[in-house]
Structure formats: structure tokens, C-alpha cells
Amino acid sequence: MAVDRAIVRRAVGDAVPLYVPAIPFSLVIGLAISEAGVNPLAGWSTSWLIFGGAAQLTLITLVGAGTALAAAVMAALVVNARHLMYSAALAPTFQNQPAWFRWLGPYVLIDQVFALAMLEEKTDPVAFRTYYLSIGFTFWALWQSTTALGLALGPVVPDSWNLEFAVPILFLGLIVIGLDKSSKAAAALVGAGVTFLTAGLPNRSGLLVGALAGILAGTMIERFRP
């Protein structure tokens, strides 16, 4: 079956602007790998083994700080637990896809891919599959390239640049894309508030608590809204 190139071009065009804030994030990853004292190739390999910047950064920084590997992996899994909710949200759409896609698709289900895919979930299954894989592997290729660049350039970037600003900006952009209902806005606010209040929980489990609280708030508003 021929690939619809118009959908591929649109997908790439949608993906690139959302990736721009991730470029400084990749420099942060590269700097973290350098400071962790791990083998550069092994550190970079986490980019495709994990393919999730927040979880990758968590794992690298904790290992670099001397945390036991098992505890570091557990913390990274907690950070990535939100992807279970992404999977649940897209499950009805994935059910209309072939088995190979249901196995491959989750690998590239990162935050940006989820935000864009949710806007396309009601399209034709073939068109959705083309769009989803195009944005997913555009992000994948860009992330592998820029984290490698970050590994080379991160250590020489001055601390005064404060590259950590890229992380909240990246997620803020994703939130803005998805806030088309009051229930979503409430979920985002409650989730952020609860995450802030539970930030001191071990293994960064406050992220999971905040996410669950946000989902509950959004669900309640949807259910009882007149």
C-alpha cells in the first residue's frame, strides 16, 4: 500500500515545532551523562532504550549520584508511569490497527506524540497510522541526534545558560495544545498542584500521585457536568 506523502509531510511539519523546546533538554541530558561518569556510548544508548527524556534524565542523574541501580530504575519507571495513561486513552484507536502496529506504536508514544495523536484519533485508521508513525519516528530521529549532540556540547555550555528551563517549557507547550475543555484544564491544575504538594515523596512518586489526582478531577467534572 502506497504511503500518503501529504500526511507524512503534515506530520513532520506538526512534529518539528513541538520538538524545538527539547533541543536544550537534550543538552541537559548530555551534561547529565558527562557528570554521571558513565561511558558516553552507554549513556547515549539510554536515548533509544528508554526514549523518554524525563525518565532518562532521572535514571542518569540518580545513577550519577550513587543511587542503587534498582532504585534508579524504579524512579524512572514512576516518572514514565504517565505513559500507561496515554496508552489507555489511545487504546480504542489502537484496537482498529493491525497487530504489528499495536506492538510498534507504544515504543514512540512520548508526550508530544500523544498530544498530536489525540487530535487525530477519529481519522481513518490508515491515515492515523501513517500520521502517528511519521510524528513518532520524526521525534525519535531528532532525539537520537540531539542527545548525541548534547553529549558532545553539554559539558562546554556555561552554567549561566540555565538550560533546565527547557523542561517546564516543553511540558507547558503540550498542556496548551490539549486544553480544549474545562475538564482538561481542571485536570492539569489539580495534577500540578498535587504534584507540587507531594514533591517530597520518595522515588519521585509524587508525579504519579499528581497524575492520578488530575485524572480523577477531570473525570469527575466530565461525569457531573450538565
Image (spheres, rainbow, N blue to C red):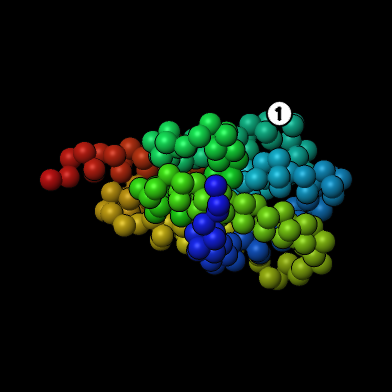
Residue 14: percent from left, percent from top? 50, 63
The residue lying toward the viewer, choosing from 61 and 80, is 80
| Residue found at x 39% / y 36% | 92
| Residue found at x 46% / y 41% | 86
Pointer 1 local density, CA inside 10 Å: few below 14, some 14–19, many at least 20: few
Residue 222: percent from left, percent from top? 24, 43
The residue lying toward the viewer, choosing from 191 and 3, is 3
In which quarter of the view is residue 46 placed?
top right
In the rendered view, would you say 178 is above or below 187? below
In which quarter of the view is residue 50 placed?
top right
Q: Amino acid at mark 1?
A: Ala
Question: In the rendered view, does 63 fall on the left or right side of 105?
Answer: right
Q: Which residue is mark 1?
A: 70
Q: Visible in this render: residue 86? A: yes
Residue 57: percent from left, percent from top? 67, 48
Question: In the rendered view, does 162 fall on the left or right side of 85?
Answer: right
Task: Identify the residue at the far front of this view.
Answer: 1
Question: In the rendered view, does 80 fall on the left or right side of 85?
Answer: right
Residue 38: percent from left, percent from top? 84, 45
For label 1, the SS is helix
